[in-house]
Every structure is written in C-alpha cells, then in structure tokens.
Amino acid sequence: MHTREFDNLHQDTLYEKSEVVLRAGLLALSSGMGAYRVKRVMSRIANALGISNQAHVTLTEINSTCSNHHTYCTKVATLQNVGVNSDRISKIGQLTLNLRRKTIKHSIKCITDELISIEEAPLLYSTTSTGIFAGIACFSFAFLLGGNFAEMVLAFLGAFFGQIVRRLMLVRHMNQFVTTVVAVFVALFAYSIASLIGLEFGLIEVRDISGYIASLLFVIPGFPLATGGLDIAKLDFSSGIQRVCYALVIICCATATGSSFAQVLGMSPIPTTFSLHGFSNEQDIIKLALVLLFSFIGVLGFALIFNSTHKVALTSALIGAFANTFRIVLATLGITAFISTTIAAMFVGILAAVLVKWFDFTRITLSVPAIVIMVPGSYLFYGSYEALTGNLMLSWQNEAQAFLRLLALPVGLSIARFLTDKKWRVDK
C-alpha cells in the first residue's frame, strides 16, 4: 500500500510538471516563436523541474512528452490563434535565462507564477498607437518604392485606418485571412478617398501607385516567414512548411485584395522603383541618406507593431536601417537581387547575434523587424495584378523576382545563425 501511494505521488508530480512545460510551450508558440525556439524553451523549463522533454511543434499544435526515469506523460495542445508578441518573446527568453542562472527557484509554483505574469501582461500599445506605427512604416515604404511625398502621406492614412481595423478584429479572434482581406480593403479605401480629395483640391498634381502598394504592406507576416525558413533550415519541415504556407496565404490575401480593388477603380499601375545611378554626385548621396533615414523609420514602425519595447524597437531599427541601405548599395554596384538581399539578411543576423550578448535581448525580436523592410512588396503586388488581368508571363516574372527576394531573407538569417550559434551548427 505504501508503494502504491508513492507511485501515485510520483505520477501526480510528473503530471504537474508536464503541465507547466506545456504551458510554457504554448505561451512561446502564441508569441510567434519558431519550433526550434519553442522546443528549447520547453526543454529548459523541463530541466529546471528535473525532468526531460521531447516535443513535436507545428504552427498551431504541440505534442509534448515529459519523462522522469521510466515514467512518461504525454500531452497534446492546440493553439487557436497565430500571432506575434515581441515583448512576450523577450520575457520568456529572460525567464529561461534566469532559470539557467538560478536566480528563480526551480519549483512548479515559482515557474507557474512567472508564466502567468507573462501571459497576463497587457499589450504595450493601444489600438490607435499601432495604427500610427503602421502608418509611419508604410509612409517609409512608399518612399523606398519611389513615391513622392503626397503618396507617402496617402500610404500613412491608408495603413493607419487599416491597422486599426485589423487590430480590432484580431483581439476579437476573427479569422485571420478574413481579417487580412478586410484590413487591406479598409486601407485601400481610405487611401482612395484621401487621394480623390487631394486631386479635387489640387493637393496632388501627379499620382503614382507606390503609396497604394505601400498602404497594404502593414499586413506582411514577417515573423512566420522568417521562423518558417529557420525551422526548415533545422530540418523541422512540419513546422517550417506550415509557417511559410501561412505567410504566403496572408500575402496572397493582401495582394489579391489590392489587385482586385485596383481593377474595380480602373487603375493601371505603372511600376515605380527607387534607384541610385552611382555615388559620384551629391543628389545620390542625399538619396542614400534618405534611404537610411526611412529604413530606420520603417523598421521602427514594424517593430512597434510587433509589440516590442522602445529599446528593442530602436535597436532593431538601427540594424535594419544599415542593412537595407547596404543592400541598396550592393544592388547599385551590380550585385544581383538574391545575393544582395541574402548578404543584407546575413548582416542583420550577425548584428543581432552580437547585440544579444551585450544586452538582454532575444535575437529573433531584433532580426525579424529588420528584414521586413526588405520584403519585395511591389513585385508581389504587380505579380498578382498581372495575373488578374491575364498577363501570365509578366505575372510570373514579377512573382519569380519576389520569390527570390523572399527566399533570400531566411537564407541570410540561417547563414548568420550557422556562423554565430554553435548549437545551430551541430545537430544533436
């Protein structure tokens, strides 16, 4: 009888510990972490509790098995919503770091209390604030697409209203694909109304399409795109492919909505691009300085949308500003788009790796916002638009250019991770 009671107590203890490990995994997954990072968080929590853990993680599911000698406990959980919370990622990273430093007691109660505190922490910014952040990000995107000041202002207005609607729908757990379509529609509708008013009162003289494209880029799913690529690099195909597919479907929803809306309005988009002819005259030097400035503002806006703290957002903006400017310089010197984007993304990953050793940052919260500014929004839009108009050859050309640039981003981050992280280089 005494032996049976001991066995039941042992089973209950393992059960409680496995609950804590699974809770930590779900919290990490809901914040936008990739499968590799989620598994590492769960493993470190399990080790702190004196057990071991093996987990299978996908975009929305975790299958977790905890063991204590010859006893096993398996739990399965499903995540209802996919999202990004940079502040939560940082706090989870800090928790695991404190456990390794043993500044937090290794007990179920202490770890659970920490997880509850992280889970219940409110979002850092209000709905209106995130609208402003989206606006300044797309304001900068319009410049980098070659737009004039009027188009930049129109992009700000469109993204501002679109992000507010998107945030209101997401906090109510609306379907994310429907949310993307509605948010993009609202953004483009606001852009169009503001554009017509500007034309009517003579505030806009020449109208191009760069602001129209930029106003929908606030929905770009940078986190799943990057983490999916990193998961694939770690041979975790079940999670990586799901994340990349999710990101691509969100992008397709956005570009298809934008293209359809343009056709309804009778627009005939003419591609506009930002380009430098060299570095021999003062005008191009000024342009390069403006690229650095608006790249900084754009990355800052995205980092704040992802709920980053001001310190993390500013650091990420500095990294992204220099990396994107470096990419444009390489392109001006004749380096192909894929190689220049890969080098720039690798530059982001290496800088992020260096800075996390100096500060209590998490690498992914610095690197992802910094690469979102390099997403080829114009190629994605024109590819979708030409497909709807039946010009399949031109559509495939634009989509191929977009694919190469999108592929370069996780490739560059993976190379940087391989160079700077021993645990990443060696599979155990």
Image (cartoon, rainbow, N blue to C red):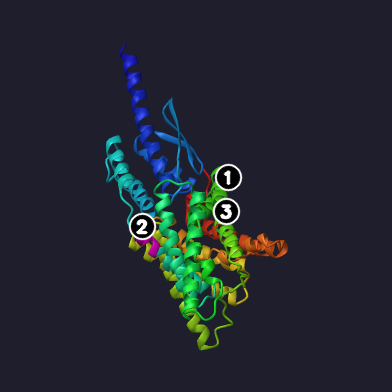
- Residue 305 vs residue 208: left or right? left
- Residue 157 vs residue 125: left or right? right
Residues at circles 3 and 1 in contact by the CB criterion of under 8 Å: no
Q: Nearer the viewer, mark 2 or mark 3?
A: 2
- SS for callout 2: helix
Q: Position of residue 247 (x, y in %)?
A: 54, 52
Q: Which residue is mark 3?
A: 248
Q: Nearer the viewer, residue 399 or 254?
A: 254
Q: Nearer the viewer, residue 25 or 140?
A: 140
Question: Label 1 sits on what residue type?
Answer: Phe
Q: Which residue is mark 1?
A: 237
Say which mark, if any, is on residue 358.
none
Separation of residues labelled 2 and 3 (CA atoms): 25 Å
Residue located farthest toward the bottom when viewing the structure as drawn: 281
Q: Nearer the viewer, mark 3 or mark 1?
A: 3
Q: Is residue 27 above or below residue 148?
A: above
What is the quadrant of residue 386 in the picture?
bottom right
Separation of residues labelled 3 and 1 (CA atoms): 16 Å
